[in-house]
Image (cartoon, helix red, strand yellow):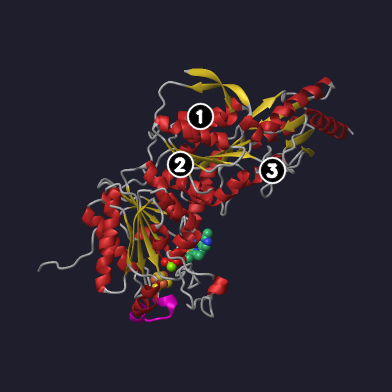
Amino acid sequence: MSEKILIKGNEAIAEAAIAAGCRHFFGYPITPQSELAAYLARRMPKVGGVYLQAESEVAAINMVYGAAAAGVRCMTSSSSPGISLKSEGLSYLAGCDLPAVLINVQRGGPGLGGIQPSQADYFQATRGGGHGDYHIIVLAPGGVQEMYSYTRDAFDLADKHRMTVMVLTDGILGQMMEATATENGEQTADNRQEKPWAVGGVRGERARNIVNSLYLKPSELEATNLSRYEKYKQVEETEQKYDSYLLDDAEIVVAAYGASSRIAKNAIDEARSKGVKAGLLRPITLWPFPKKAFAAAAKKARAFVSVEMSMGQMIEDIELSIRCSRPVTLCNRVGGMVPDPAMICEAILNANKEATA
Amino acid sequence: MSVVFQKTPMLTDAVLHYCPGCTHGIIHRLVAEAIDELGVGGRTVGIAPVGCSVMAYNYFNCDFIQAAHGRAPAVATGVKRARPDNIVFTYQGDGDLAAIGTAETVHAAARGENITVIFVNNAIYGMTGGQMAPTTMPGQVTQTSPYGRDPKTAGYPLRVCELLATLDGTAYCERVSADSVKNVRAAKKAIKKAFQNQIDGKGFSLVEVLSSCPTNWGLTPSAALDWIRDKMIPYYPPGVYKDTP
Ligand SMILES: Cc1ncc(C[n+]2csc(CCOP(=O)(O)OP(=O)(O)O)c2C)c(N)n1
Ligand code: SF4
Ligand SMILES: [Mg+2]
């Protein structure tokens, strides 16, 4: 059952969390994600849920840590500077293999940066963010509909793999309004998932559960890391996700995610009208990066262009995925500036010229 | 033969790792007895801090979460909001609760979170080898205040009960001491009340226990208890600072 409504990206994420059965949200205000929290502050009490404004992002992520340990679906959201503060909690969530959902509506950095859209947190997101060997799953929606559906999916993925799933978006997508199909019908708190590891009191029925990431014996700590990386290998194998546009015969492959990918599509049409066979490969999972799709594209393509609102971050994953077998150039704007189609088109034409020369 | 004393069921059989003469062990027992006497062990979730009591999860016979340094009240908030029928308590040292976790402590209290906080004040960072804590007293020598804490450069200690008593959200806070039989009994009563308050839905309850660290104070266990009496109690007077009926 679905119904199309006109909704803002940030609100679509909030509504998707409700649809996923999330009834616990812990937040802290920051532009450009504030509508998300405001929406849930209105919505949660209506569905018997908890909206709690924490004293900081550090506290919010630790509330998520507690709620996740207690076995409920829970979420927190922020924007770039706030995500830095959440990194401690992300590392602990990973160390305890707890499922949680985190939203980053990125803005420009470093430091306080700006409040305009950016993709400069790519490294932070895809490399985990906090200390220690760990990963989080990172989903990059390309529009409001996907913000809804991938946030919905994020909760399932989190529970399935007992990992944090981040929905990585930006100020453009967060503020954008689009017609979006949402689920309706009965929305109940989703605590159906069996979570035999969760705390909640032994109630005379089971051995006690301990949620902990401390292992003073190096051999034991190593073993937890190794088994966690077995899980990550499985996730890399099964969860890579991407989308494409005019990719089949593409000689110049444009790689872009999120807001950048929307602009890149226009540039690809423009390049095609000038006789260059360009196509788009849009990663949807940034971790695991869709390596297989890139490796396959490299077999036919002559060059790649990484379109980013960052100083060349995703480009490293492209080069790794294709083992530097083709030239990869960067086309970017940063600090809240957005690449325009003409600039991307020029980058495509240049890549084509160099590949031909 | 009749049993005159035995381990309370809320304590596991694990051997405590605390130093000889450390009163962390006594405080563990008081907490465990309180939970057992109230009969809520089956629905209790404890939150362990970072500090000497980081492995409290090995000693308490209930579900447990180990939290990041200072974050236990936020973690407890998450659990309590997710499972309001759980009895949720944190067990934290002074560095954990009154330095790195001050914001989490004050705001959990300000929100009136219906949780129980056991605050072990030993005026030192025990686990890391005896550095100055937020509760280290003026003149007290530690590894990082080798000439004695000088308030001119190192500032003044925090009196947590006095601070929290000003907040509307705090239902109950009391300072007790683990230095003598009499005071240990009073501590037990306070701890039990802090749990009873949670059962009754009264809101944020905290018990501060003045505790010894013979190892890092460089004192024998009995001299350390004297030091609590002679130095700490005058600076941190025991008593009920807030008790909302
Ligand atoms: C983020 C972080 N900073 C610092 C530490 C190091 N550390 C471990 S225990 C501790 C002090 C604990 O002192 P206290 O809370 O007073 O507990 P006690 O050991 O005295 O019982 C510190 C600073 C840490 N583990 N994590
Ligand atoms: S270092 Fe101090 S606080 Fe820690 S166990 Fe030893 S005596 Fe107790
Ligand atoms: Mg201490």
Residue A346 image label: none
Q: Can I make out residue A288 in this image? A: no
For mark 2, name the chain. Answer: A
* Alpha carbon distance from label 1 to label 2: 18 Å
Q: Do labels 2 and 3 share a chain?
A: yes
For mark 3, name the chain. Answer: A
| Magenta span | B214-224
Amino acid residing under circle 3: Gly
Q: Earlier in the sequence, mark 2 or mark 3?
A: 2
Q: Which numbered disc, 3 or 1, marks the residue closer to the eye?
A: 3
Give the x, y percent position of residue A82: 58, 46
Q: Are marks 3 and 1 in contact (CB under 8 Å)?
A: no
* Residue tagged 3: A114
For mark 1, name the chain. Answer: A
Q: Nearer the viewer, residue A266 or B187?
A: B187
Q: Does the magenta segment cover residue A133?
A: no
Q: Could you tell me which residue is drawn at 32 percent across and 46 percent down? A: B86
Tell me which corner region of the image, top left, top right, bottom left or bottom right, holds residue A330.
top right
Q: Which SS type dominates the magenta stretch? A: helix
Q: Which of marks 3 and 1 is nearer the N terminus?
A: 1
Give the x, y percent position of residue A272: 80, 22
Which secondary structure lies at badge 3?
Answer: loop
Q: In which quarter of the image is the C terminus of chain A?
A: top right
* Residue tagged 2: A52
Q: Do the residues labelled 2 and 3 touch (CB within 8 Å)?
A: no
* Residue tagged 1: A16
Q: Residues within 10 Å of mark 1 (few under 14, many from 20)?
A: many
Amino acid residing under circle 1: Ala
Position of B3 with respect to A76 (left or right) is: left
Which secondary structure lies at badge 2?
Answer: strand
